[in-house]
Image (cartoon, helix red, strand yellow):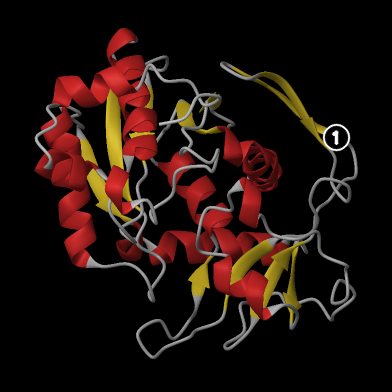
Amino acid sequence: MANHYIGRLAPSPTGLLHLGHARTFWIAHQRARAASGQLLLRDEDLDPQRSRPEFSTAMKEDLQWLGITWAAEHRQSNRLPLYRAAMDKLLTAGLAYPCTCSRRDLAQSTQAPHEEDDEPIYNGHCRDSTPHRTLAANTNYRFRIPTTDPVAFTDLNAGPQSFTPDTDFGDFILWRKALSLDQPDGLPSYQLACVVDDALTGITEVVRGRDLLKSTARQILLQRALDYATPAHFHTELMRDANGIRLAKRHDALSLRALRAQGFTPSDIIAKFAIESRNTL
C-alpha cells in the first residue's frame, strides 16, 4: 500500500537511553499508531569505538518496558554494502571528494550532529582535490554540495524551515577511512547511512529531535543526489536538565534504566513527557 505509514526508531548503542530519547520514541510510536502504520527499529551501531552490545540489549528492553513495539529491526553494521553502493554513485556523479582535513570532524562523523556539537562549516580546503571515481582505501570523503540555494521544507511540528549551504553548513563528511582492521574499507557517516536506510526501508516519516533540523537539510540534498524520495519530518521539542542543557547520555540519573531501578513505572515516565523543553526536570 503506497500510502502506508512507516516510521522508525533509530537509537545508537553508545549509552543508556535517557528520558529525552524515550519521549521522542514514544511520540514516534504514537504517531505510527494514529496512522495505523508500523515502526522499524534501526540499531545505529556504526561507531566502533563507542557502540556496545550491552547497550543494544538495554535499549530494546527499555523500549519494550515502556510499551513501544516495532515490526522489524536491523543493524547498520550489517548493511555496509548498501552504503558503499550509494557512496559509489556519489563518486561517479562527482559529488564526493577526498579530504585530508579536520580529524575532529571525521571522528564525529558516525554520530548524529546535535546542535552543540554540529560539524563546523568546512573551509573548502580539499574541494579542488583530484576527483575519485571509485572509493580509495585509507581515504576520507566529503559531499560536494551542488547548490548554494536554500534548502526549505515544512516540518510537521516545527513549521517552515530553511537552511542555506555555505552559511548554515558546508561540504560535510560522507565516508571515514578505516580506523581498525575490523572495517578495512572504512565507514559511512551518519548522514549517508541515515539517508540510505530511510530510503531503502521505505520510511515515510522521520520523528527526531529539533537539534537535527540542520541535518535534515543536509539529508535532503543527499536524497536528491541519490534519487531518493524525501520523507515527512516531525522534529520534537528537546528535554533539558535543571541547567537548561539538552539531555544526553551523560545524564545517567535520567536514563530509563536508572529510573526503572528507582521504581518508576511506564505510566510515570509517560507523564514526564508532558514537560516541554523550556521547562526543567
Seen from this angle, which residue lies furthest front?
242
**Disc 1 residue type (three-letter):** Pro
Side (left or right) of 91 relative to 74: right
**Spot occupied by residue 30 in the image (x, y as percentages of width and height):** 31, 16
| Label 1 CA crowd tier, 10 Å (few <14, some 14–19, many 20+) | some
Q: Name the residue located 23 percent from the left edge and 44 percent from the top edge.
A: 73
**Which image quarter: residue 72?**
top left
Side (left or right) of 120 relative to 156: right
Q: How many dots with numbers?
A: 1
**Which image quarter: residue 268?**
top left
**Spot occupied by residue 99 in the image (x, y as percentages of width and height):** 74, 78
- Nearest the viewer among 5 and 191 is 191
The answer to whether 189 is drawn above or below residue 198 in the figure is below
The answer to whether 21 is drawn above or below residue 193 in the figure is above
Look at mark 1 in the image and give the residue it sits on. Answer: 150
The answer to whether 12 is drawn above or below residue 203 in the figure is below
Q: Name the residue located 46 percent from the left edge and 39 percent from the top edge.
A: 241
The answer to whether 145 is drawn above or below residue 160 in the figure is below
Q: Is residue 19 visible?
A: yes
Q: Name the residue located 36 percent from the left edge and 16 percent from the top edge.
A: 31
**Spot occupied by residue 77 in the image (x, y as percentages of width and height):** 33, 65
**Spot occupied by residue 122 in the image (x, y as percentages of width and height):** 81, 64
- Nearest the viewer among 250 and 207 is 250
Q: Which quarter of the rendered picture does the N terminus lie within?
A: top left
**Which image quarter: residue 217?**
top right
Q: Is residue 228 visible?
A: no
Side (left or right) of 95 relative to 270: right
**Helix, strand or loop at disc 1?**
loop
Q: Name the residue located 61 percent from the left edge and 77 percent from the top edge.
A: 135
Q: Which quarter of the rendered picture does the C terminus lie within?
A: top left
